[in-house]
Amino acid sequence: MQKANAKEPLELYKDSDAQLLLSKFLSGEIKKLEPVYDHRTGYTYPAVEAIVGDSSLVQPFLNKLLQAGVLEKKLYDKTISCPSCGSADVSFRYCCPFCKSFDIQRSSLIEHVKCGYMDIEVNFRDGDRYICPKCHTELKKIDVDYRKAGIWCSCNDCKKNFDIPVPEHFCRNCGTVSAFEGAVIRDVYAYTVKESLRNTVTLNWLLVSPIRDFLTDEGFTVESPALLKGKSGTNHSFDIAAYKDKSRQKAIVVDLAKSNEDFVSEQPVIALFAKIFDVSPDRAYLIAIPQLNENGRKMAQLYNIRAVEAKDAKEAVKTFKEKLR
């Protein structure tokens, strides 16, 4: 089975919070984890907060899954916070570049195509009509009789005109006014399970952890993932290996295989046989979701591989327990 990340801590498999969140992804309850905005606190992830129980733990928890290579993130928004009090309740103002007042008026520049006269929109208006102030012709069709040539602003305080206003941020919580240079800008992300690792995640979180716990309760020493040295001197990787003696001679090995199709092919059976031929474990299990194809079943029986076929992870764990006992 493909591992999400070679450096991923095994403790992550035992994390009940991680199991709960990922089960929501895998069941379709959460397709994309998107933040929810509150004007006082900014963006939050209520679904994650309900799992971890404290808002301060949400981002470290998501970062842990992200660093493990299970989740991936995509920029959802950028937030602006007050540099003085940290509040997210910040408004955006357009200001006069001369006196810095935000009491400005925005208007469109209109150009009469025929005579070339250009002025602000209010000077062309005559009730519901546009009339050229220079030649007094009525302008009926945009981009035929006239065109909009841009934006023109005027300041109601200093009475000056300009085309580009200056932005500023106003904190509604403490009243601090700040410019772009002092803005506190934070990236906010939406999260999804990596599609290429969806099968791996399903197996790791919903299969490996409960099987490992079950084997531990049965008195086994469990390694997952596990490396066993064969007679050839080659190390072979198994998803789970369990031992009841310190010599590690009588091992139970388990590999997992999942397919999005109706059947798992015989390839995982062949791969497992090649490993157990060299390692010679006491028992070998292949857990296949949803089921092996006919060739796979025949080969598993021929190679003395105990096949556990199940429609989902929950059924697979139950069936594995029954077969082991």
Image (spheres, rainbow, N blue to C red):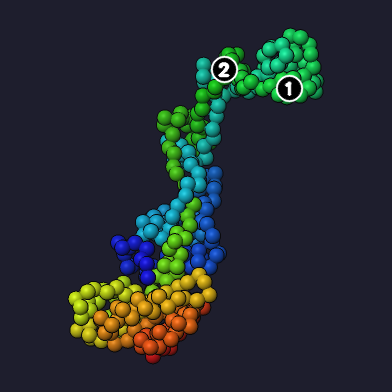
Q: Residue 210, position in %: x, y?
A: 40, 77
> Dividing the picture into quarters, in which one does residue 322 lie?
bottom left
Report the mark closest to the observer, 1 or 2: 1
Q: At 29% across and 87% down in the image, what residue appears? A: 282
Looking at the rendering, in which quadrant would you find the N terminus? bottom left
Q: Amino acid at mark 1?
A: Val
**Rendered location of residue 132, percent (x, y):** 75, 13
Residue type marked 2: Phe
Q: Residue furthest top?
A: 134
Q: Secondary structure at mark 2?
A: strand
Q: Tell me how far mark 1 sits from mark 2, CA to CA.
A: 27 Å
Visible residue check, residue 61 = no
> Which residue does the numbered mark 2 point to in the structure image?
162
Q: Quadrant of residue 118?
A: top right
SS class, disc 1: loop
Q: Is residue 77 visible?
A: yes
Residue at horizontal 34%, vertical 61%?
5
Image coords of residue 303 (percent x, y):
35, 86
Residue 228 pos. (x, y %): 25, 76
Nearer-the-camera pick, 299 or 224: 299
Name the residue carrying label 1.
144
Disc 1 crowd, CA 10 A, few/some/many (<14, 14-19, 20+): few
Left or right, 119 with reference to 273: right
